[in-house]
Image (cartoon, rainbow, N blue to C red):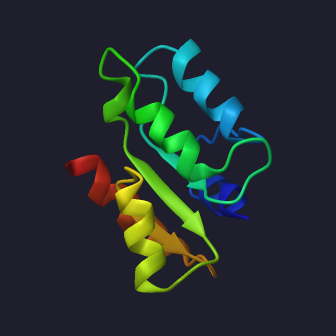
Amino acid sequence: MAQTLLEDKGIKVTWAKDGLEAIMMVKENAMDCFDCILMDTQMPKMNGFEACKVIRSLPNNRNKLPIIALTANAFEEDRKACLDAGMSEHVSNPIEIQSLLQTIESVLKK
């Protein structure tokens, strides 16, 4: 759903089916290929928390890529768990496109 909302706003979205694929995409593409990552916290093979920790350990400034958690979990302890895992920000469902765009803009300015 987030992909469609973002594409409707003219934003290019590249989709990974799970955390392992997301890590490989960050490793194998040019460092300026992605502006940020929207990371689902619940994925098969490797969840978003584990994938974020791996991305944060990558060399050559790839570990600095902003990562925004997208999750159905909306409690403050869920947000804290995302930030503790190394994510830059947290957005919970239902996703409001304006709020998501503001969050993306905020992490890109840091």
Residue 75 position, x and y percent, is 48, 86
As drawn, which residue projects farthest toward the bottom? 75
Residue at image location 42% in from the left, 37% down from the top: 35
Residue most extreme to the left: 110
Which residue is rendered at x = 74% and y = 52% of the image?
43
Quadrant in which the N terminus appears: bottom right
Q: Position of residue 24 (x, y in %)?
A: 63, 22
Q: Image point 55% across, 78% down: which residue?
A: 96
Q: In this view of the protein, which residue sits in the foreground, 1 or 11?
A: 1
Q: Is any part of residue 10 visible from this angle?
A: no
Horizontal side, residue 79 vs residue 43: left or right: left
The number of numbered badges drawn on the structure is 0
Q: Quadrant of residue 19?
A: top right
Left or right: where does residue 67 sit relative to residue 64?
A: right
Q: Nearer the viewer, residue 42 or 38?
A: 42
Residue 62 in percent (x, y) is at: 38, 24
Above-or-below relation of 74 to 32? below
Residue 77 lies, with reference to residue 24, above or below; the image says below
Vertical relation: 23 (above or below) 107: above
Note whether 39 is above or below 21 in the view shown.
below
Closest to the observer: 17 or 85?
85
- Where is residue 46? Give x, y as percent: 70, 43
What residue is drawn where x is 36% and y is 30%? 63
Q: Can the viewer see residue 55 in this picture?
A: yes
Decide if residue 13 is on the left or right side of residue 89. Answer: right
Q: Is residue 105 left or right of residue 50?
A: left
